[in-house]
Image (tube, rainbow, N blue to C red):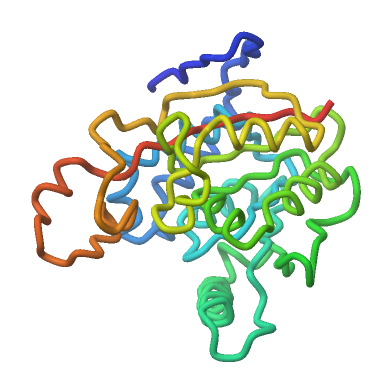
Amino acid sequence: MRTALLTTTAAMILAAPGPATADALGDAIAGDQRSAENRSRDPWRHPRETLEFFGFAPDQTVVELWPGGGWYTEILAPALHDDGTLILATLGEAEPDSYRTRSHRQFVAKLKSDPDTYGKATTIDFWPPESTSLGAAGSADLVVTFRNTHSMLRRNQFDAFLAAAFDVLKSGGTLGIVQHRGNPGSDVKDAARTGYVPEALVVEKATAAGFVLAGRSEINANPKDTKDHPEGVWTLPPGYHLGDKDRAKYAAIGESDRMTLRFSKP
C-alpha cells in the first residue's frame, strides 16, 4: 500500500487504518458491483489511498457531492452498507431535458438497478441557490467531492457548497476534495474552459469558510500532465474529447494531475 505524502506545515499525523476500514475498502474495491471500465481507472484515482487519507471509516456518515456516474459510489455504498450511512447529493432534475436532469436520472437508475448494494443510500438534491443543504447540522463525519470544483466555480456555487459542508459536518469532521490542479497563479476564469483549478484558490476559499487545512497529498498527482491541452482535462483519458487524434499521446500522459486536500472543521 502506498503511503500518502503530506506536504503542509500543519500536517496531521494520520493513524493507520484499522482492520475494519481495511477490510471494508478492500472488499468494496474488489467487489463485483464495480464495472470493468471503472476498475481500469484505479491506477490513476487510487481509491483506497485517497479514502484512507480522508480518514474514511465504515461506521461513518458520509456525504458524497455530485457523484456523476457513481465511480466512487460503487466503493462507498458497499463499504458503508453494514455500519455506516451514505448520503448522495445529486444534481436534481428541476430543469427538463437538461444535462443536469439526464445525469440525475441515469444515476438514480443505477442505484435502483442494484438495491443490494445501493438500497441503504439516501439521495438528496444539491443545486445552489435552489437547494443548499447537505443534511442536518452536525450530522456527518465526512464530506467528499471528486473533480467537481471547476463546475461549482463556473456556476458560482463553490462558496455555497463550502458553507453547506461546514454546516453538515460534526466538529472535527473532514472535507475531502480531489480536483484537477492548475498551475500556480493560473487564472481561475480558465477553470470553466479547462477544468484546471489553482490549488491556492481552493485552500483560500475553504479556509475562508471556516475550515482548517489538515493535509495535502500527492496520491493523485501526475507530473506528466502539462495542462495545456486543446480540450482541457477532457482531452486526456477517460474523456478523449479529440477522439482518435493524438490518442496514443494522451493515453501515455494518463489522467489529469490532481490536488488531494483534507480539511477539518474545528
Quarter of the picture holding the N terminus: top left
Q: Viewed as shown, does residue 123 lie left or right of 222? A: right
Question: Which residue: 71% across, 36% down?
Answer: 206
Compared with residue 93, is residue 126 higher up or lower down, i.e. above or below?
above
Question: Which residue: 85% across, 37% down?
Answer: 170
User: Which residue ends up furthest to the right in the rendered image?
Assistant: 137
Observer-nearest residue: 192 or 103?
192
Compared with residue 245, is residue 20 higher up or lower down, i.e. above or below?
above
Tell me residue 191's x, y (percent).
Answer: 47, 51
Residue 188 in view of the camera: yes
Tell me residue 237's x, y (percent).
Answer: 26, 53
| Residue 127 occupies quadrant | bottom right
Q: Viewed as shown, does residue 166 lie left or right of 35? A: right
Question: Which residue: 10% across, 62% down?
Answer: 245
| Residue 205 occupies quadrant | top right
Total count of labels: 0
Tell me residue 224's x, y (percent).
Answer: 23, 33
Tell me residue 78's x, y (percent).
Answer: 56, 52
Q: Viewed as shown, does residue 57 lie left or right of 250? A: right
Compared with residue 50, is residue 153 higher up or lower down, i.e. above or below?
below
Observer-nearest residue: 18 or 1?
1
Question: Which residue: 74% across, 25% down?
Answer: 212
